[in-house]
Image (cartoon, rainbow, N blue to C red):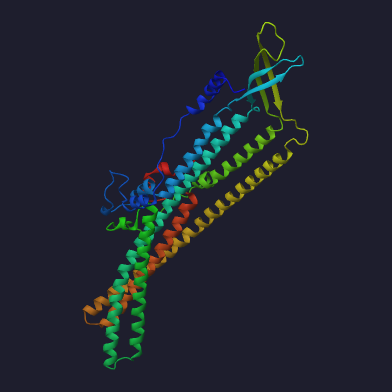
Amino acid sequence: MPLTTARWSLVGLCALPIGCATAPPPAARPDPAQIAHQFQSRRPESANPDAPAAAEGWDRAQWLDAALRLNPVLAEARARAAATAAAERTAAQRPNPTLNLFDEYITAAAGGVGWLYGLSVDFLLQRPGERARAREAAALETQAAQSDVAESIWTVRMQLRAALLDAVDAQDEAADLERLLADRQGLLDSARARAQAGEISALAIGRASIELAEAQQRRDRTLSRLLDARGRLAAAVGVPYSALAGAPLLWAAWSDISALIPDLSADARSEALIARPDLVRTLREYDLAENSLRSELARRWPAVHIEPGYAWDKGGARENQLNETLHDNELGLSLELPLFNRDEGPIGEAAARRTLAGRHLEAVQADLFDQIDRAQQSWPRARDAWQNAVALAAAAQSQDAAEQRALAAGAADRTDALAADAAAIEAHLLALEAAYAAQQAFGALESAYRRPLEGPERELPHLWRLE
C-alpha cells in the first residue's frame, strides 16, 4: 500500500527545516588566468589608498603595513584561522533528533489483516560535559590557528628585514666598489706606464690586472645580490618584481651599529620564554590532547538514546466491531553495552598522545632557551667586531687623507695615493661587512624574542603583543 497524502505531508514538514537552512552564496570557481592578471597589476600602495607612493621612499613600517595587506601567504593563514574558528559554531550545536517513519502489514490470528502506521523520534542524550568539551576543543583549535597567524606575521617581518638589509648593504657596497674599480684601473695604468719606463717589473702589470678583475667580479656579485634582494622584498610584500621599479630602498644609518640598544631585561626574556606564538601553539596542542583524553574517559559511560513513538491503525489488524482507530504509544531506550571493552584502547592512545604533547612542549621550550642564549651571546661579539672594523677603517681613512695631502704638496706620487685610497675603500668594505654581520646577529636576537627591538615597526605594537 503506498504512502497516504497525509504521510507525505508529514515527511515534507519534517524535511522543511533542512531545506530552509542558511546556505552561503554561490561563488565562481577561481580562474588562474584572472588571478595572475590581478597579481601582475598589484602595487605596494594599492591596498591602502591613504599611503604615499612607494617611489617617495618607505621605511620598514610602511613596507610591513603593505605586506600585512597584500602578502598571499599571510592571507592564507588568516583564512585558515577563520575556517578553524567556524568550527566553534558547529561544536556548540546540539544533535538533532532522528525521525523514523514506518508501516507494517499485520495478519491477526483471528484472520484480520491491515496496515499499521507509525513514527518514532530518536533523541540522543549526550554524556555529561560532552558538549562543553567539544566547544573547548574548538576554541583551542582557534587559538592555535591564531598563534599560527602571529607566527606568519613575524615570518613576513623577518623576510622584509632581511631583504631590505641585503638591498641597502649591496647598494653601499656597490658604491664603494665603483670607487675601488676606478682606483684599480688607475693603478693598472700606472703599472703599465712604469713598466714601460723600466721602473718596475712587468709582473706588476699582471698583479694589477688580477686585482682589477677581482674588483669587477665583486661589483657584479654585489649588483646580483641587490637584484635578488629586490625580488625577495617584492615576494614578502606580495607584489610582482616590476611593482618595485623606481621605488628606492632606504634604511637610514643601517651601518651605525652603535645606535642599536636592545631591551634585554629579565622580564622581556621571561615573556619570550612563555608567550612566543610557536610556544603558545604547542601549549594549545597539549590542551587539546588533555581534552581528547577527558573525552575518551567519558566514553566509558554509554550514550543513551530515547525513542518515543506512536502508531495507529484503522481496524483490520484487530477485531474491532466499532471500526475504531486504534492507537499505540511506545517508548524505547537504547545504549551501548560495555561487554567486551570499556574503551581501554582509545583511552590508552589518548594518554600516550598527551604524554607526547608534554614532551614536545618541553622540547620546544628548550629550543627557545637555546635560541635566546645563543642570540644574546652572539650579539655582543658581532658588535665588538664591528667596532674593531670601524676603527681599522678610520685608521685607513686617516692614512689615505695623509697620502692625498702629500700628493698635493708634491711629496708623494700618484701611485701611492691611489694605493692608499684603495686600501681605505677596502677597509670601509670590511666595516660594511662587519655591520651587516652585526645586523644579522641583531635580527637573530629579535627573532629569539619575537618582537622588533628597534626601528619603525615598533609603532605597530598590536602586532607584537605576546598573549
Indicate left or right for 346 with 26 as reference: right
Q: Is residue 43 above or below residue 307?
A: below
> Which of 43/24 is in front?
24
Number of labels in the image equals 0
Single out the residue that lies furthest toward the front.
Answer: 111
Indicate left or right for 13 with 188 as reference: right
> Which of 269/68 is in front?
68
Whether residue 93 is visible here, answered yes or no, is yes
Quadrant of the rendered image containing residue 133: top right
Quadrant of the rendered image containing residue 334: top right
Single out the residue that lies furthest toward the top.
Answer: 322
Whether residue 60 is visible here, answered yes or no, is no
> Which of 286/443 is in front?
286
Indicate left or right for 281 with 356 as reference: left
Residue 227, given in percent of the width and then of the height, sits at: 35, 63
Residue 19, given in percent of the width and then of the height, sits at: 49, 28
| Residue depicted at 36% across the width and 47% down the height | 65
The N terminus - image quarter: top right
Residue 427, given in percent of the width and then of the height, sits at: 36, 71
Single out the residue that lies furthest toward the bottom.
Answer: 198
> Which of 23/157 is in front?
23
| Residue depicted at 32% across the width and 76% down the height | 422
Q: Is residue 198 above or below residue 269?
A: below
| Residue depicted at 71% across the width and 42% down the height | 348
Residue 342, given in percent of the width and then of the height, sits at: 74, 35
Q: Is residue 72 above or below residue 303?
A: below
